[in-house]
Image (spheres, rainbow, N blue to C red):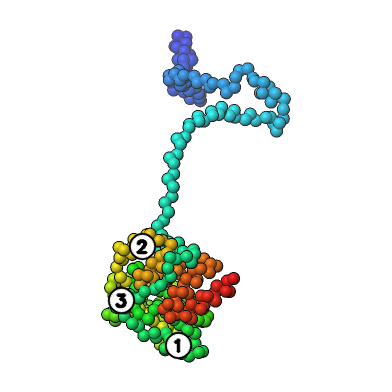
Amino acid sequence: MLAASLVLALLYATPSDEPGPGLQVVQEPPARPSRAEHVPVPELVPEPLLDEEPTELVREAGDLEPAEIPVPLPTPEPRTEPQHIAAAEPAPIPPAREEASQDPEPEPVVVAMNFTGPLDYAAPAGSTYLEPLGVLRNASEDLPTLQALVPDHVARTVEASPTLYWFLSEDIEHPVKFVLADQVSIDPALELVLEPPLRAGIHALRLADHGMELQLGTPYRWFVSLSSEHLTKGGIERVARDPGLEARLAAAPGERGKVYAGAGLWYDALAFISTGVERNPDDVRPRELRALLLEQAGLERAAAFDRAQQTSDE
Protein backbone atom coordinates (compact mmCIF):
# COMPACT_ATOMS: atom_id res chain seq x y z
CA MET A 1 0.00 0.00 0.00
CA LEU A 2 2.73 2.28 0.92
CA ALA A 3 4.48 1.67 -2.38
CA ALA A 4 1.39 2.38 -4.42
CA SER A 5 0.82 5.71 -2.66
CA LEU A 6 4.37 6.76 -3.40
CA VAL A 7 4.03 6.01 -7.11
CA LEU A 8 0.86 8.07 -7.35
CA ALA A 9 2.52 11.02 -5.62
CA LEU A 10 5.37 10.98 -8.10
CA LEU A 11 3.01 10.93 -11.04
CA TYR A 12 1.26 14.11 -9.87
CA ALA A 13 4.51 15.91 -9.15
CA THR A 14 6.00 15.34 -12.71
CA PRO A 15 5.14 18.19 -15.20
CA SER A 16 2.98 17.25 -18.17
CA ASP A 17 2.30 18.87 -21.57
CA GLU A 18 -1.35 18.98 -20.80
CA PRO A 19 -2.37 21.16 -17.86
CA GLY A 20 -4.14 19.38 -15.15
CA PRO A 21 -7.50 20.29 -13.98
CA GLY A 22 -7.59 23.63 -12.22
CA LEU A 23 -4.06 24.60 -13.26
CA GLN A 24 -2.95 27.11 -16.08
CA VAL A 25 0.51 26.88 -17.48
CA VAL A 26 1.90 30.02 -19.25
CA GLN A 27 4.69 29.30 -21.65
CA GLU A 28 7.11 32.13 -22.59
CA PRO A 29 7.64 32.51 -26.33
CA PRO A 30 11.04 31.52 -27.47
CA ALA A 31 13.44 34.40 -27.95
CA ARG A 32 13.69 35.45 -31.65
CA PRO A 33 17.15 35.60 -32.93
CA SER A 34 18.25 39.18 -33.89
CA ARG A 35 18.73 40.06 -37.59
CA ALA A 36 22.32 40.91 -36.86
CA GLU A 37 22.96 37.35 -35.83
CA HIS A 38 21.70 36.00 -39.17
CA VAL A 39 22.45 38.82 -41.77
CA PRO A 40 25.65 40.66 -40.99
CA VAL A 41 25.30 44.36 -41.99
CA PRO A 42 28.45 46.47 -42.12
CA GLU A 43 28.31 49.29 -39.69
CA LEU A 44 28.09 52.69 -41.50
CA VAL A 45 29.97 55.38 -39.73
CA PRO A 46 29.15 58.87 -41.16
CA GLU A 47 32.07 61.11 -41.84
CA PRO A 48 32.21 64.09 -39.53
CA LEU A 49 30.92 67.32 -41.14
CA LEU A 50 33.37 69.39 -39.18
CA ASP A 51 36.89 68.80 -38.11
CA GLU A 52 37.29 67.16 -34.78
CA GLU A 53 39.03 70.25 -33.58
CA PRO A 54 36.63 73.26 -33.90
CA THR A 55 37.93 76.09 -35.99
CA GLU A 56 38.39 79.56 -34.67
CA LEU A 57 35.22 80.72 -36.43
CA VAL A 58 33.16 77.94 -34.76
CA ARG A 59 34.61 78.70 -31.34
CA GLU A 60 33.74 82.39 -31.72
CA ALA A 61 30.25 81.56 -32.95
CA GLY A 62 29.58 79.60 -29.79
CA ASP A 63 29.75 82.79 -27.79
CA LEU A 64 27.42 84.80 -30.11
CA GLU A 65 23.72 85.06 -30.37
CA PRO A 66 22.13 83.40 -33.46
CA ALA A 67 21.54 86.77 -35.17
CA GLU A 68 25.21 87.71 -34.71
CA ILE A 69 26.74 84.54 -36.12
CA PRO A 70 28.64 85.58 -39.26
CA VAL A 71 27.86 83.70 -42.42
CA PRO A 72 31.02 82.87 -44.29
CA LEU A 73 30.96 84.10 -47.87
CA PRO A 74 32.12 81.80 -50.64
CA THR A 75 35.68 82.33 -51.61
CA PRO A 76 35.76 83.72 -55.19
CA GLU A 77 37.70 81.75 -57.66
CA PRO A 78 40.90 83.42 -58.79
CA ARG A 79 40.37 85.43 -61.97
CA THR A 80 42.47 84.63 -64.91
CA GLU A 81 43.32 87.55 -67.11
CA PRO A 82 42.29 86.92 -70.71
CA GLN A 83 45.16 86.45 -73.00
CA HIS A 84 45.62 89.35 -75.37
CA ILE A 85 45.30 88.16 -78.93
CA ALA A 86 46.48 90.67 -81.44
CA ALA A 87 43.72 91.25 -83.95
CA ALA A 88 44.64 91.08 -87.56
CA GLU A 89 44.76 94.46 -89.20
CA PRO A 90 41.60 95.03 -91.25
CA ALA A 91 41.97 95.11 -94.96
CA PRO A 92 41.99 98.65 -96.33
CA ILE A 93 38.56 99.79 -97.45
CA PRO A 94 38.57 100.73 -101.10
CA PRO A 95 37.34 104.23 -101.84
CA ALA A 96 33.64 104.42 -102.60
CA ARG A 97 32.86 104.68 -106.25
CA GLU A 98 30.79 107.59 -107.27
CA GLU A 99 27.44 106.56 -108.66
CA ALA A 100 27.13 107.31 -112.30
CA SER A 101 24.76 110.15 -112.87
CA GLN A 102 21.76 109.46 -115.05
CA ASP A 103 22.23 112.80 -116.76
CA PRO A 104 25.91 113.53 -117.42
CA GLU A 105 26.95 117.01 -116.44
CA PRO A 106 27.33 119.35 -119.38
CA GLU A 107 30.67 120.97 -119.96
CA PRO A 108 31.12 124.34 -118.25
CA VAL A 109 29.43 127.25 -119.92
CA VAL A 110 31.70 129.87 -121.36
CA VAL A 111 32.40 132.48 -118.70
CA ALA A 112 33.16 135.45 -120.93
CA MET A 113 31.74 137.02 -124.06
CA ASN A 114 35.01 136.63 -125.94
CA PHE A 115 34.05 134.31 -128.77
CA THR A 116 36.19 134.35 -131.86
CA GLY A 117 32.93 135.13 -133.66
CA PRO A 118 29.27 135.92 -132.86
CA LEU A 119 26.81 133.36 -131.51
CA ASP A 120 24.92 132.77 -134.75
CA TYR A 121 22.22 130.18 -135.26
CA ALA A 122 22.16 128.71 -138.74
CA ALA A 123 18.90 127.01 -139.74
CA PRO A 124 19.54 123.64 -141.42
CA ALA A 125 18.93 123.48 -145.14
CA GLY A 126 15.52 122.07 -146.09
CA SER A 127 13.92 122.74 -142.71
CA THR A 128 10.14 122.44 -142.52
CA TYR A 129 8.36 125.71 -141.77
CA LEU A 130 5.87 125.81 -138.85
CA GLU A 131 2.93 128.14 -138.42
CA PRO A 132 3.57 130.15 -135.21
CA LEU A 133 0.35 129.20 -133.43
CA GLY A 134 1.50 130.82 -130.22
CA VAL A 135 1.44 134.26 -131.80
CA LEU A 136 -1.92 133.77 -133.54
CA ARG A 137 -3.77 132.32 -130.55
CA ASN A 138 -2.42 134.74 -127.94
CA ALA A 139 -3.93 137.92 -129.39
CA SER A 140 -6.15 138.55 -126.35
CA GLU A 141 -4.52 141.02 -123.96
CA ASP A 142 -6.21 139.61 -120.84
CA LEU A 143 -4.51 136.22 -121.22
CA PRO A 144 -0.86 135.46 -120.48
CA THR A 145 1.47 134.76 -123.35
CA LEU A 146 2.48 131.16 -123.98
CA GLN A 147 5.41 130.71 -126.32
CA ALA A 148 7.35 127.64 -127.37
CA LEU A 149 10.99 128.71 -127.47
CA VAL A 150 11.73 127.42 -130.97
CA PRO A 151 12.39 128.97 -134.36
CA ASP A 152 9.70 128.94 -137.06
CA HIS A 153 10.77 125.54 -138.42
CA VAL A 154 11.32 121.99 -137.20
CA ALA A 155 14.52 122.46 -135.21
CA ARG A 156 17.05 119.70 -134.59
CA THR A 157 18.85 117.91 -131.76
CA VAL A 158 21.38 115.11 -131.41
CA GLU A 159 20.08 114.09 -127.98
CA ALA A 160 17.75 111.12 -127.55
CA SER A 161 15.93 112.84 -124.65
CA PRO A 162 16.41 116.59 -125.11
CA THR A 163 15.03 119.45 -123.03
CA LEU A 164 12.20 121.60 -124.40
CA TYR A 165 11.75 125.22 -123.29
CA TRP A 166 8.64 127.40 -123.22
CA PHE A 167 7.86 130.87 -121.95
CA LEU A 168 5.03 132.15 -119.72
CA SER A 169 4.54 135.90 -119.41
CA GLU A 170 2.61 135.92 -116.08
CA ASP A 171 2.11 133.86 -112.94
CA ILE A 172 -0.93 131.63 -113.30
CA GLU A 173 -3.07 129.43 -111.07
CA HIS A 174 -4.22 127.23 -113.90
CA PRO A 175 -2.91 123.83 -115.11
CA VAL A 176 -0.95 123.71 -118.35
CA LYS A 177 -1.16 120.74 -120.70
CA PHE A 178 1.85 119.39 -122.60
CA VAL A 179 1.58 117.01 -125.58
CA LEU A 180 4.32 115.46 -127.73
CA ALA A 181 3.27 113.60 -130.88
CA ASP A 182 4.73 112.38 -134.15
CA GLN A 183 2.99 112.70 -137.52
CA VAL A 184 2.12 109.01 -137.84
CA SER A 185 0.81 107.68 -134.54
CA ILE A 186 -2.77 108.29 -133.46
CA ASP A 187 -1.97 108.52 -129.75
CA PRO A 188 0.54 111.10 -128.46
CA ALA A 189 4.00 109.92 -127.54
CA LEU A 190 3.83 111.86 -124.25
CA GLU A 191 1.03 113.73 -122.52
CA LEU A 192 1.40 115.63 -119.24
CA VAL A 193 -0.50 118.06 -117.04
CA LEU A 194 1.68 120.67 -115.33
CA GLU A 195 -0.01 121.61 -112.09
CA PRO A 196 -0.20 125.22 -110.83
CA PRO A 197 1.02 127.50 -109.52
CA LEU A 198 3.29 128.29 -112.45
CA ARG A 199 5.61 131.29 -112.29
CA ALA A 200 6.27 133.73 -115.09
CA GLY A 201 9.50 133.04 -116.95
CA ILE A 202 11.26 130.40 -119.03
CA HIS A 203 10.29 126.81 -118.17
CA ALA A 204 12.18 123.61 -119.01
CA LEU A 205 10.62 120.22 -119.68
CA ARG A 206 13.20 117.40 -119.69
CA LEU A 207 12.05 114.38 -121.68
CA ALA A 208 14.57 112.23 -119.79
CA ASP A 209 12.58 112.82 -116.59
CA HIS A 210 9.64 111.04 -118.22
CA GLY A 211 11.56 108.22 -119.91
CA MET A 212 10.87 109.59 -123.39
CA GLU A 213 13.31 109.10 -126.28
CA LEU A 214 12.93 110.48 -129.78
CA GLN A 215 13.37 108.23 -132.79
CA LEU A 216 16.08 109.17 -135.27
CA GLY A 217 14.78 110.96 -138.35
CA THR A 218 11.19 111.26 -137.07
CA PRO A 219 9.71 114.79 -136.90
CA TYR A 220 7.64 115.55 -133.77
CA ARG A 221 5.28 118.34 -132.79
CA TRP A 222 4.90 119.46 -129.19
CA PHE A 223 2.20 121.68 -127.70
CA VAL A 224 1.80 123.73 -124.53
CA SER A 225 -1.76 124.93 -123.88
CA LEU A 226 -4.04 126.55 -121.33
CA SER A 227 -7.07 125.59 -123.42
CA SER A 228 -7.91 124.48 -126.95
CA GLU A 229 -7.90 128.13 -128.01
CA HIS A 230 -4.84 129.24 -126.07
CA LEU A 231 -1.79 127.25 -127.10
CA THR A 232 1.64 127.30 -128.69
CA LYS A 233 3.63 124.64 -130.51
CA GLY A 234 7.09 123.70 -131.67
CA GLY A 235 8.74 121.14 -133.94
CA ILE A 236 11.71 118.87 -133.20
CA GLU A 237 13.67 116.17 -134.99
CA ARG A 238 16.51 114.01 -133.74
CA VAL A 239 19.46 113.64 -136.11
CA ALA A 240 22.60 111.49 -135.97
CA ARG A 241 25.79 112.83 -134.43
CA ASP A 242 28.34 114.06 -136.94
CA PRO A 243 31.99 113.04 -136.32
CA GLY A 244 33.06 116.55 -137.30
CA LEU A 245 30.72 118.00 -134.65
CA GLU A 246 32.24 115.80 -131.95
CA ALA A 247 35.72 116.98 -132.89
CA ARG A 248 34.69 120.65 -132.69
CA LEU A 249 33.03 120.09 -129.30
CA ALA A 250 36.15 118.38 -127.94
CA ALA A 251 38.34 121.23 -129.17
CA ALA A 252 36.24 123.96 -127.51
CA PRO A 253 34.30 122.50 -124.55
CA GLY A 254 33.50 125.95 -123.15
CA GLU A 255 31.96 127.09 -126.44
CA ARG A 256 29.46 124.30 -126.91
CA GLY A 257 26.63 126.79 -127.26
CA LYS A 258 28.36 128.47 -130.18
CA VAL A 259 29.27 125.13 -131.82
CA TYR A 260 25.73 123.77 -131.50
CA ALA A 261 24.20 126.99 -132.85
CA GLY A 262 26.56 127.05 -135.83
CA ALA A 263 25.68 123.41 -136.62
CA GLY A 264 21.94 124.18 -136.70
CA LEU A 265 21.22 122.29 -133.44
CA TRP A 266 18.82 124.73 -131.80
CA TYR A 267 17.68 122.59 -128.88
CA ASP A 268 21.22 121.64 -127.87
CA ALA A 269 22.48 125.24 -128.03
CA LEU A 270 19.56 126.55 -125.98
CA ALA A 271 19.88 123.73 -123.40
CA PHE A 272 23.62 124.28 -122.95
CA ILE A 273 23.28 128.03 -122.36
CA SER A 274 20.18 127.56 -120.16
CA THR A 275 22.17 125.18 -117.95
CA GLY A 276 24.59 128.04 -117.30
CA VAL A 277 21.69 130.29 -116.33
CA GLU A 278 20.30 127.70 -113.90
CA ARG A 279 23.66 127.09 -112.25
CA ASN A 280 24.67 130.74 -112.05
CA PRO A 281 21.46 132.76 -111.72
CA ASP A 282 23.39 135.85 -110.59
CA ASP A 283 25.75 135.79 -113.58
CA VAL A 284 24.47 138.12 -116.32
CA ARG A 285 26.61 136.63 -119.09
CA PRO A 286 24.71 133.32 -119.57
CA ARG A 287 21.43 135.27 -119.56
CA GLU A 288 22.76 137.64 -122.19
CA LEU A 289 23.87 134.71 -124.35
CA ARG A 290 20.42 133.19 -124.14
CA ALA A 291 18.70 136.50 -124.93
CA LEU A 292 20.87 136.86 -128.04
CA LEU A 293 19.96 133.35 -129.19
CA LEU A 294 16.22 133.89 -128.58
CA GLU A 295 16.23 137.14 -130.54
CA GLN A 296 17.68 135.33 -133.57
CA ALA A 297 14.54 133.16 -133.62
CA GLY A 298 12.16 136.10 -133.27
CA LEU A 299 11.43 135.39 -129.59
CA GLU A 300 11.86 139.00 -128.44
CA ARG A 301 9.40 138.85 -125.55
CA ALA A 302 11.20 135.95 -123.85
CA ALA A 303 14.55 137.65 -124.53
CA ALA A 304 13.31 140.89 -122.92
CA PHE A 305 12.15 138.94 -119.86
CA ASP A 306 15.66 137.43 -119.49
CA ARG A 307 17.28 140.83 -119.68
CA ALA A 308 14.79 142.22 -117.14
CA GLN A 309 15.85 139.44 -114.77
CA GLN A 310 19.42 140.66 -115.03
CA THR A 311 18.35 144.11 -113.80
CA SER A 312 16.20 142.74 -110.94
CA ASP A 313 19.00 140.44 -109.76
CA GLU A 314 21.40 143.38 -109.53
Q: How many marks?
A: 3
Of marks 1 and 3, which one's residue comes earlier in the chain? 3
Q: x%, y% of residue 146?
A: 45, 82
**Which amino acid, by three-letter code, is at mark 2?**
Arg
Residue 151 lies in what quarter of the image?
bottom left
| Camera-nearest residue between 27 and 111 | 111
* Location of mark 3 (residue): 125
**Which amino acid, by three-letter code, is at mark 3?**
Ala
Answer few, some or many: residues within 10 Å of disc 2's Cα (few below 14, many 20 plus, some between 14 and 19).
some
Left or right side of 68 for 84: left
As measured in the structure, the alpha-carbon distance from the residue carrying label 2 to the one carrying label 1 is 40 Å
Q: x%, y% of residue 7?
A: 45, 12
Q: x%, y% of residue 8?
A: 45, 14
Q: Nearer the viewer, mark 1 or mark 3?
A: 3
**Which amino acid, by three-letter code, is at mark 1?**
Asn
Residue occupying the point 48% across, 78% down:
302
Of marks 2 and 3, which one's residue comes earlier in the chain? 3
Quarter of the image that includes the N terminus: top left
As measured in the structure, the alpha-carbon distance from the residue carrying label 1 to the one carrying label 3 is 30 Å
Residue 227 shows in the view: no
Residues under numbered marks 1 and 3 in contact, where contact means CB atoms less than 8 Å apart: no
Residue occupying the point 68% across, 29% down:
69
User: Helix, strand, or loop for circle 3?
Assistant: loop
Answer few, some or many: residues within 10 Å of disc 1's Cα (few below 14, many 20 plus, some between 14 and 19).
some
User: Helix, strand, or loop for circle 2?
Assistant: helix
Q: x%, y% of residue 57?
A: 66, 23
* Location of mark 2 (residue): 248
Query: Residue 129 shows which numbered tag?
Result: none
Of marks 2 and 1, which one's residue comes earlier in the chain? 1
Residue occupying the point 35% across, 72% down:
264
Query: Residue 138 shows which numbered tag?
Result: 1
